[in-house]
Image (cartoon, rainbow, N blue to C red):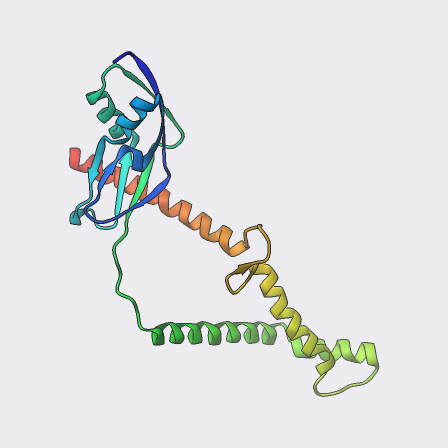
Amino acid sequence: MKEQSVYIRMRHRVQVHPNQQVKIGDVAQVISTDEIETQLKDIPVHKIQESDKNIVIIDLMKVIRLIQNKYPSIDVQSIGGAETIVRVLIEKRKLPEVYFLLIWLLLFIGAGLAVMNFHEDVSMLEVHHQIFTIITGREIEKPLLLQIPYSIGLGLGMILFFNHVFKKRLNEEPSPLEVEMFNYQQDLDRYLVIHENAESEKKLK
């Protein structure tokens, strides 16, 4: 085989099934001639076992070592990240629908209490009374003319803030919650990579 340059880019996160044979093509993007690319993608990297649990970290150095062991004349050039997080899809037992109903009820009550406590802390009712009195010149016990539109606006504001109506997205921009979840996932992935590398170094010692 003539000397060839191969470009490899590790995927950030992939999902596999239990007992699956993970190959280079599963964890990395490979660019080369068609023949070499096909051969490299079929090189086994890791066999999923029960001891792996649900997370496996595939390091770029391991991939390069496997390629050079099989094809010493190939020049491997890496692009991007150095690890791939392999998540094993373990089938979980489905919970009865009553549990989802209870969780929904708990979140609904909790969100309602949070809103009510906030309004109590900032004396929202007193503010509505003062605004109604300033606008109309009258004092009443329940300024529904303000409270009803305010309640509707509060619900619409939450929909716009989270950018979702049930499963339908209002626009292509991510909501603040999605951004926070993305940041949390990035931090979690970074922790998994560092923790797994530390465990691997302990085993080598």
- Horizontally, residue 31 falls left or right of residue 142, namely left
The extreme bottom residue here reads 141
- Horizontally, residue 191 falls left or right of residue 123, namely left
The extreme front residue here reads 35
The extreme top residue here reads 2
Which quarter of the picture shows residue 23? Answer: top left
Residue at image coords 21%, 33%: 44
- Horizontally, residue 142 falls left or right of residue 27, namely right
| Residue 24 image position (x, y, % from top left) | 28, 33
Residue at image coords 32%, 38%: 84
The quarter of the image holding the C terminus is top left
Q: Nearer the viewer, residue 44 or 162?
A: 44
| Residue 64 image position (x, y, % from top left) | 27, 25
- Horizontally, residue 118 falls left or right of residue 11, namely right
Residue at image coords 79%, 80%: 133
Up-down relation of residue 79 to residue 174 (above or below): above
Which quarter of the picture shows residue 46? Answer: top left
Residue at image coords 29%, 22%: 36
Up-down relation of residue 111 to residue 60 (above or below): below
The quarter of the image holding the N terminus is top left
Up-down relation of residue 97 to residue 36 (above or below): below
Which quarter of the picture shows residue 145? Answer: bottom right
Q: Nearer the viewer, residue 71 or 193?
A: 71
| Residue 19 image position (x, y, % from top left) | 18, 46
Q: How many marks?
A: 0
| Residue 82 image position (x, y, % from top left) | 34, 32
